[in-house]
Amino acid sequence: MDRRPLGRSELVIEPLVLGGNVFGWTVDEAEGFKILDAYVDAGFTAIDTAEGYPNWVPGNPPGMSETIIGKWMKARGNREALHIFTKVNSANKPGGLSAQAIHDGVEASLARLQTDYIDLYFSHWPDPETSHEETLGAYDPLVRSGRVRVLGASNYSAQMVRDAQQTAIVKTLPRYDVLQPRFNLYDRAEFAALADVVAEQELGTVVYYSLAAGFLTGKYRSKADLGKSPRGGGAEKYLDAKGLAILAALDTVAAAHDATPAEVSLAWLVAQKGVSAPIASATSVEQVQSLAKGVRLKLADDELKLLTDAGQ
Ligand SMILES: NC(=O)c1ccc[n+]([C@@H]2O[C@H](COP(=O)([O-])OP(=O)(O)OC[C@H]3O[C@@H](n4cnc5c(N)ncnc54)[C@H](OP(=O)(O)O)[C@@H]3O)[C@@H](O)[C@H]2O)c1
């Protein structure tokens, strides 16, 4: 399969990133190890996590996802073969991208991951109180020392990205090379608003909620289906005329390829201009194998158009 560079950065990956928010939430450590093994066995290397995953689960210590991934890398001795993405300011709070927060955050993430470098470090959410100069200035020594290889920004608007890139030029600081916005067949507006800046700045993109938190797998077709996963409640907002039109198009294309709606959803994302790789999580080995099949599936132009037009 064609590997893809993440923008102008030195990172080159297969077009699938494994989402880590499920580790310590809907997936325990033992199942997590199996999922991670299956993912690398399928030929992939990039894993996305965050200091805040999944801190919303009552009783969880901070950063359980990083801890599970760190234990697994240690057990397998495979750190060098992987691309580890993590994020600071997961709590989305003012001051979350201050120099102090970044200093503390990166050290805690490195310790939990049991590694001495992060391949791609994201500002998880913008921080309205901290200047780009302070944030990028805090990243500067981390990049120079090799503790962080590449920087990314998640949930930033096009204007925020432009402002940050301008600051990097004027102040001779490292720039963001990768964006992590939300993008899937249903939620397209955020990515569309970034298209120009992605092209202009030659940015890589790894897009999240590729399966709309499970809705695009087709397992939720009515309110009665929402109990099928602890995450089913998150799919309720997609159960409208637009969501059902997208599922109908997915069913048509999936039938032609002996594939599933989840696989076709990923194939559509991989084919979109400006997308480097979709991020998707899995709660079983079978789901990992399905994600791998999806990003390797090639759709015809008329199939891509049918999907694009559904729910426009
Ligand atoms: N930057 C940000 O602000 C941000 C925000 C959200 C997420 N993310 C990243 O994006 C990743 C993915 O997000 P996500 O996990 O919330 O949503 P997602 O990838 O859209 O949905 C994944 C969920 O769908 C189900 N699934 C996956 N493959 C399936 C298959 N083949 N058949 C049936 N069901 C399948 C699984 O849940 P069940 O088995 O429980 O149904 C899985 O956890 C996260 O792990 C995280 O790394 C980033």
Image (cartoon, helix red, strand yellow):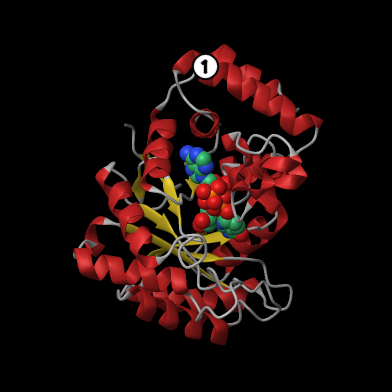
Front-most of 46 and 249?
Answer: 249
Asked if residue 205 can be seen in this view, the reply is no
Q: Amino acid at mark 1?
A: Ala
Residue 153 placed where, x, y %? 57, 60
Mark 1 vs ligand 1: CB below 8 Å: no
The extreme right residue here reads: 241
Residue at (43, 49) in percent of width and height: 17
Residue 188 placed where, x, y %? 69, 39
Judge the density around disc 1: few (<14), some (14-19), many (≥20) Cα neighbours within 10 Å: few
Q: How many marks?
A: 1
Residue 110 placed where, x, y %? 37, 77
Q: In the image, is residue 234 above or below residue 121?
A: above
Front-most of 53 and 92?
Answer: 53
Please state if 50 lies on the left or on the right of 2 as rendered.
right
Residue 225 placed where, x, y %? 67, 41
Front-most of 142 and 227?
Answer: 227
The quadrant in which residue 251 appears is top right
Query: SS at mark 1?
Result: helix
Q: In the image, is residue 100 above or below residue 130?
A: below
The quadrant in which residue 28 appears is bottom left
Residue at (61, 66) in percent of width and height: 167
- Image quadrant for the C terminus? top right
Q: Which residue is mark 1?
A: 255
Residue at (30, 76) in percent of width and height: 114
- Image quadrant for the N terminus? top left
Asked if residue 297 can be seen in this view, the reply is yes
Residue at (60, 79) in percent of width and height: 134
Front-most of 119 and 208?
Answer: 208
